[in-house]
Amino acid sequence: MLHTSATLNTLPHSAQQIYKAMDTSGLTPLFDAEGKFIWNTLEYNGHKVYPFPNIKNKLDSYMKSFPVLDDDIYLPTYSKSGSHWLCEIVMMLTRRSADYRKEKTSQNMLEFWFDPEAKQNGGRRVMITHLQLGVMPPDILNNSSGKFIQIHRNPADLAVSFFNHLTNLTDIAGHLTHDWNSFITEIFCDRDRMNHPTWWDYTSEWWTAFKDKPNYLPVFYEELKEHPVKVIGDIAEFLKVGVDQKLVEEIATRVSFDRMSGEKRKIENHGPVFQEGFTFYRKGIVGDWKTHFTKEQHEQFMNHHNKELRNIPELYQRFIQYLQP
């Protein structure tokens, strides 16, 4: 939602500063079938990107030059796939410590707070991004020495988590006013109404381009939940961090959803962006979608899923088991 200068002055000072930092020129409003405003999007190089503050200038700079390091770690993820969870695990492994970080994960967000010129305080640089390939910094994509770890989550659970995320935004950050039925039947699967790529477009594009690269490791949310020690061990081996089994097991215990959500909620401070009481660590339950989807919504969703992933059998087989009623 865009604010006029009059309504902007009624917002808290911190909220005004964030809003003023956003370049609202070039934003495109998106509407539903009845002409009701959904949200704004921003197009960059022919791709939709979420209009984070100053994102156009950031991407312009990244496209020209991005200072890569041989041991960089990139975490390209679709929103609500478990990027905060994965980032915490990777930071523990690279620091060889199961202690929780006090820093906000958003500081690792490539298109948000990340500063490529800032000195790192120990460990390797870890960067989260939700960008499609077409708007990724070319220097990163060409960094064959860097490591790419991508966490994938079944789209039904992701949709529920995403809806909760969007409806807890404040007006200044683009609060979604549509109900669940409208979101899941008209918006989430629609390329024209999503304000950034659909899950299917994003996932299939990255998978097709990177699945055979030696510096790419796919991680699956559901497997990480069920077999955390094994998956964390696989990540450690991929990163060649040289940690022992005892630390892997300790990290697995510390990043269990209940343990980590309790610790992280103590330091969460979302300011004017999210409504009071919001947390990035809501439930983390595999199959939670079954308590939200109606039979008709599920049938429509599955028709779309079967159509979109029919040509990528590896992903289709991976996710279909978690989408059964």
Image: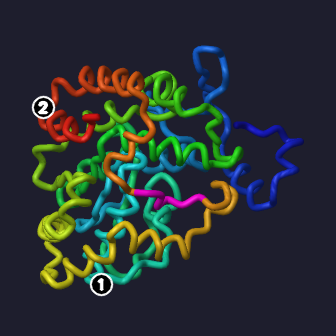
Instruction: Please name the residue shown 28% across and 65% down the image.
Output: 72
The reply to whether the magenta stretch includes residue 235 is no
Instruction: Please name the residue shown 45% across and 42% down the image.
Output: 160
Please state which amino acid type lies under the numbered disc 2.
Answer: Pro
In the depicted structure, whether residue 253 falls above or below residue 288: below
The secondary structure type at the circle numbered 1 is loop
Relative to 274, 55 lies left or right: left
Q: Which residues are magenta?
A: 278-283
Relative to 137, 231 lies left or right: left
The reply to whether the magenta stretch includes residue 279 is yes
Q: Which residue is mark 1?
A: 97
Report the front residue among 187 and 64.
Answer: 187
Quadrant the N terminus occupies: top right
Name the front one of labels 1 and 2.
Answer: 2
Report the front residue among 202 and 116.
Answer: 202
Instruction: Please name the residue shown 27% across and 53% down the image.
Output: 221
Report which quarter residue 223 is drawn in.
bottom left
Task: List x then y, in percent, for residue 111.
Answer: 48, 52
Give the mark, 1 or 2, whose residue is nearer the N terminus: 1
Q: Is residue 52 visible?
A: yes
Q: Which residue is mark 2?
A: 313
In the depicted structure, whether residue 100 falls above or below residue 258: below
